[in-house]
Image (cartoon, grey):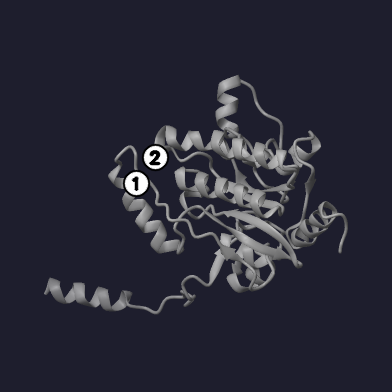
Amino acid sequence: MIVDKIKKRETKNNRPTNKVDIPVGKWVKCDNCKEILYKENIKENESICPLCGHYFRMSSRRRIEQIIDKGTFEEFKLNIDTVNPLKLEEYEKKLDSLREKTGLTEAVKCGTGKIFSKDVVICVMDSAFFMGSMGSVVGERITYSIEKAIELKIPLVIFTASGGARMQEGIISLMQMAKTTQALSKLDEAKILYISVLTDPTYGGVTASFAMLGDIILAEPGAMIGFAGKRVIEQTIGESLPEGFQTSEFLLEHGLIDKIVERKELKTTLYKLISLNYGGDK
């Protein structure tokens, strides 16, 4: 019978496979060297590839753990919610999904803390939430943090990681550029130190506002920093751009940032700069 022959074929094909039983979520592929790495090893190495030195993006939670003294971070509790001015149904669904997935309410965490016992106001953007894009809530949190730094008379540190303004909020997202810039002008008048730390990626309206207005601008190695993307610029001007364009190394060479700092040295570097601002390590 034809049915019996089909059954025999199915039995023959039911051979053991050579697939390895790898636990889901325990391994990650390095974008640079393409090696498969154990996540715990990367975490212990400050989210840096132990083989090629590639910098993985860090969550805001991990960044705060890295920079702020243990047990000293106090997040600002602002009673504001993300708006949907264009009434986009998919936007609200995406917000709910990201909040559940990341445990974040928005693309930046802000609060006060200590860096080797030195008081600071710190804001850390998170690219896992809408690519760190700046909407009304992100703009308000940044602005509130600037105002708190003025009120408390302590330095401000902002870690940027963003694709730019959040287009789902239309012109309201673009207004945050002027809002944060104006707040920083008041910080400057109050003679409060502002250190901007650029991480991968920092683009669009964030670059065009508070990211590049620091008294001191630091960056991580290999971070991509710019306003528009490379391909957009090339299409606009009709020319090829130089190798390494928009990397932190390129920006340092052309005088747009002050220093590139290895991730493992960031906390110490920030402490030294803040200590100098206080008039020495007292």
Q: Is residue 217 left or right of residue 160?
A: right
The image quarter in which residue 181 lies: top right
Q: Residue at left 68%, top 38%?
A: 213
Q: Is residue 275 left or right of residue 52?
A: right
The x and y percentages for residue 109 are: 55, 57
| Amino acid beneath label 1 | Tyr
Q: Residue at left 46%, top 72%?
A: 24
The x and y percentages for residue 238 are: 60, 20
Name, please, the residue furthest toward the top.
238
The x and y percentages for residue 162 are: 56, 46
Q: Residue at left 64%, top 22%?
A: 239
Q: Are marks 1 and 2 in contact (CB under 8 Å)?
A: yes
What is the quadrant of the N terminus in the image?
A: bottom left
The x and y percentages for residue 121 are: 65, 56
Disc 2 on helix, strand or loop? helix
Disc with the residue nearer the chain's start (1 vs 2): 1
Residue 59 visible within the image: no
Q: Residue at left 16%, top 77%?
A: 4
Residue 155 visible within the image: yes
Q: Give the class, few, some or many, for how many residues have Cα within 10 Å of label 2's Cα (few <14, many ≥20).
A: some
Label 1 to label 2: alpha-carbon separation: 7 Å
| Amino acid beneath label 2 | Gln
For mark 1, what is the residue?
91
Of residue 236 and residue 206, the one placed in the foreground of this image is 206
Q: Is residue 145 left or right of residue 45?
A: left
For mark 2, what is the residue?
168
Of residue 245 and residue 211, the one placed in the foreground of this image is 211
What is the quadrant of the C terminus in the image?
A: bottom right
Disc 1 on helix, strand or loop? helix
Residue 202 has which mark? none
Q: Give the class, few, some or many, for how many residues have Cα within 10 Å of label 1's Cα (few <14, many ≥20).
A: some
